Image (cartoon, grey):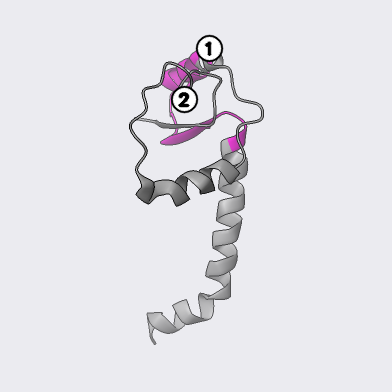
Amino acid sequence: MTLIEPGGYSTDWSGPSAKHSEENPAYAGVREAAKSRPSAANPGDPTATRGAILKVVDAEEPPLRIFFGKAPIEIATKDYESRLATWNEWQPVSVEAHGA
């Protein structure tokens, strides 16, 4: 089994064919925050995934997880660099929690 983690693709996912529910005012802040996030400036071509999927399916040892698209690896790299910095900063406390 492989978990495919896709980036943004040029589809009509949120376009005119999408069905939207009535906006809940309790989530107004979330909607505003979402507007400030960068959008996919260069979305992928969904038809290009066919060959990539077949390569994963036909692989002798397919990965447990794979990113599809250009952006996910950049996002994950920044996220994990930040996490590693925090974990390293707090490593003395972590070692202390291990005990003697």
> Between residues 42 and 65, which one lies in front from this camera angle?
42
Q: How many angstroms separate mark 2 from mark 1 (CA)?
A: 18 Å
Total of numbered circles in the picture?
2
Task: Give the residue pinned by disc 2.
Answer: 14
> Between residues 44 and 64, which one lies in front from this camera angle?
44
Q: Residues within 10 Å of mark 1 (few under 14, many from 20)?
A: few
Q: Is residue 83 above or below residue 22?
A: below
On the rendered image, what quadrant is the N terminus found in? top left
Q: Which mark is residue 20?
A: none
Is residue 51 found left or right of 25 in the rendered image? Answer: right
The mark lying in front, picked from 2 and 1, is 2
Q: Dot 2 lies on which element?
A: loop
Q: Amino acid at mark 2?
A: Ser
Magenta region, residue range: 50-71
Q: Amino acid at mark 1?
A: Thr
Is residue 89 found left or right of 41 in the rendered image? Answer: left
Question: Residue 82: x and y, percent?
Answer: 59, 60
Does the segment drawn in magenta span residue 86? no
Q: Residues within 10 Å of mark 2 (few under 14, many from 20)?
A: few
Could you tell me which residue is drawn at 52 percent across and 16 percent down?
46
Q: Earlier in the sequence, mark 2 or mark 1?
A: 2
Is residue 52 found left or right of 40 in the rendered image? Answer: left
Could you tell me which residue is drawn at 66 percent across and 26 percent down?
42
Task: Give the residue pinned by disc 1.
Answer: 47
Question: Residue 10: x and y, percent?
Answer: 56, 20
Could you tell me which residue is drawn at 41 percent across and 19 percent down?
57
